[in-house]
Each structure stands twice: as structure tokens, then as C-alpha cells.
Amino acid sequence: MAKNSSSGADTSSAPKKNRWYKNLADSYRIVARTYKWVPYAMIILPILLLGGSVALGMVLKPVWMWLITGVMLALLADMLILSTLLRPAMYSQVDGTVGSVYVVISQIKRGWVINDQPVQVTREQDLVWRIVGRAGVVLISEGPSNHVRPLLVNERKKINRITANAPVVFIECGHDEGQIPLKKLPRKLRSLKKQLTKAEVPAVAMRLDAIEAKSSPIPRGVDPNNVRMNRRALRGK
């Protein structure tokens, strides 16, 4: 059946989008759990802005215009607080949990081909994720360094057999020596040197996917659905 079917059944089964105020409430809960000072800042800062606007209105006239300006500035200030702190708060809360790397790489807007399943998994839930971009094939691990290093090396050997010309980059996320904290992963990805052309990126990704579709990296007894972070847990639902 075509995906763009207009039948009533298809329409009724389509997932409903969250309303903006629900998304705003979710963002507030995530930020407030990490930064305990945020609720106070979101009350005190608007009061100060409104008070300053009224004081200016008393001097410069008309008061109502400055009051409206103060309300707009107060709302803007609170929105800036949430938008600035949302991602750091989210990364801080999932740091150290299984699938935390996927939470970060799933936020990448464009320029990368991202696998939604890890390419290496152990029974101890040490993971290796693969993304392909202008920097080449980037393997990102989560888990103790002495556990994930062999996984990274084995995955690189597999990639070199499939596409020998694509550069392979290792990034270890964690808190061991030589690893980087989860919150620094986006910056690390942006700093990587570009080595592939835009046309080569999808070609390399498609070749890797086509070959590896024949074999599963997930050992028996490991549920692949349990290696990705459940975002509802972040919202406290």
C-alpha cells in the first residue's frame, strides 16, 4: 500500500504530534532536573525585566508601551534559558546510560548518515555506533575503554575489507582516560577534518549497509530495542 494513501484508517493511525505547550513543559522538566537554579531564574529574571520596563515607562512614557516591551523581554528571557540549556541538560541526564551516544547523534541535523542500531554490541552492553560523513566512517563507542577498544579495532577491519579507501575515525565516549564526555561529542564531530566529498558519503554508507545487512552484530540474548535510550524517560513520563 502506498504511504500517501488518504484512507480514514491511515489518517487515524498516524501518530499525533505533541502540542507546543507540551513540548515546552517537557523541556522545562528536563532542564530543571539538571539545573536546580533554573526555576528561580525563570521567576526572578522576568520580575526584574518587568520592573525595569515599568520604571523606564514612568520616565519616558507611555507606561503601557514599556510594560508590553517588558512582558515580551521576560518571555524571551525564559525561552532563551530553556533553549540554551536543554541539550546540555539532556546529555547530562543520559550520560552513562545504555544508548546515550544515540541520543546525541540523533540530534545531528544533516551531513551524516546515521545507523539507528549499534554495529557492535556485547552482553555487557558495551556499544559501538557508526556514522558516515565528510570526515569518513566515524565509530563512536560507549563503555569502559578496555572493553570497547577491541570492538573498535574489529569494526575497522570489517570496514577496511568492504571499502578500503574510506578513512575510519575512533571516538570513545566515557570517563576513562583518553575518552571524551558525552556533552563534548557534538563539538568533537564538528572538529573532524573533512576527507570525503559529498557524493562519496552516501556511496560509502550504502555499501556498508548493503554488506552488513547480511549479518547481525547483536549477540544472542541481547534485545536490540534495549540499546537505545527511551526519550520518554527524559520527560519523566
Image: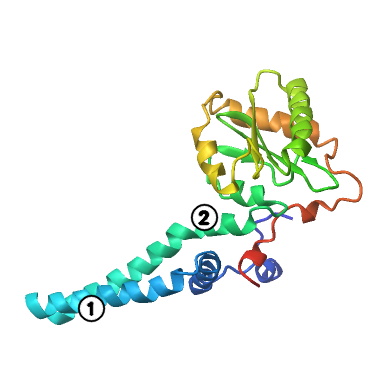
Q: Can residue 76 be seen in this view?
A: yes
Q: In which quarter of the image is the C terminus?
A: bottom right
Residue 169 drawn above or below residue 130 = above
- Image location (x, y in percent) of residue 18: 56, 70
10 Å neighbourhood of mark 1: few (<14), some, or many (≥20)?
A: some
Colour scheme in use: rainbow
Q: Quadrant of the N terminus?
A: bottom right
Residue 56's quadrant in the figure?
bottom left
SS label for mark 2: helix
Q: Which amino acid does label 2 sit on?
A: Pro
Residue marked by disc 2: 88
10 Å neighbourhood of mark 2: few (<14), some, or many (≥20)?
A: some
Chain-order first, disc 1 or disc 2:
1
Residue marked by disc 1: 51
Residue at 51% from the left image edge and 27% from the top image edge: 193
Please identify the residue farthest to the left as the structure is shown.
60
- Image location (x, y in percent) of residue 82: 44, 64
